[in-house]
Amino acid sequence: MRIKLEDAKAGDAITWKGNGIFYEILSRPLSWIDYRSHWDRWAWHTGYIVRIFPDGEVVTSQAIAKGVEAVTYPSVKDMGECRIYRWLENPDQEKIDQYTQEHSGDAYDALVYLWVFLGGISMIYLHHPFRVVNGLKMCWENLSEFCRYMGKELQPEEEPCLLSRVVTRLEEK
């Protein structure tokens, strides 16, 4: 369920607005593959809130070109054009910290979009899901695996991590 920025807390999921050439090129075929999800193509990048300090500083976990790392912002409003979702009911801060620490520094998967498209086509049109799990992470996987670790998965583990499905689940009330 989407929440107001000012209501954000540790464990909440974040999606950032897509932009740029890669977003324009890659999001279109993904929306065609999973056309039934009704994904509005707004979101592209994802992460989760690790911690919000009393002064408002926000620590997030994101998989970016350098890999999975903590990205800090002075406040929630400084995170840019994003949406915050309350997916986890009562996230345990120790578990959040543990997952974040265990996966900090995981390498970014440069071929991930190929695996996602192939897995998505196979799952949706051939009714045979498969997911390439190679120890590397992209932002959608980082968020999805974090939620699974916390006890409430966004997508079944055997399915390719499709942003369209992740956002559709996050938007559920």
Image: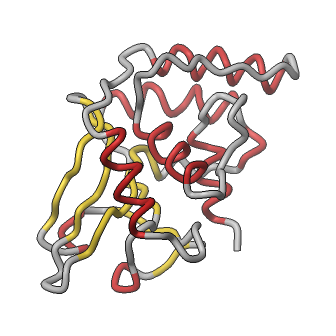
Give the tally of numbered discs. 0
Identified at 54% across, 31% down, the residue is 28
Asked if 93 appears above or below 122 in the picture, the reply is below
| 55 to the left or right of 25 | left
Residue, far right: 127
Q: Quadrant of residue 78?
A: bottom left
Q: Tell me where residue 82 appears, x and y as whole percent.
A: 36, 62
Q: Is 112 situated left or right of 167 in this image? A: left
Q: Is residue 117 left or right of residue 37?
A: left
Q: Image point 30% across, 47% down: which residue? A: 101
Is 147 located above or below residue 139 in the figure? below
- x and y percentages locating residue 92 in the rendered image: 47, 70
User: Left or right: where does residue 117 sit relative to residue 79?
Assistant: right
The C terminus lies in quadrant: bottom right
Residue in view at x 50 percent, y 33 percent: 27
Q: Nearer the viewer, residue 48 or 163?
A: 48
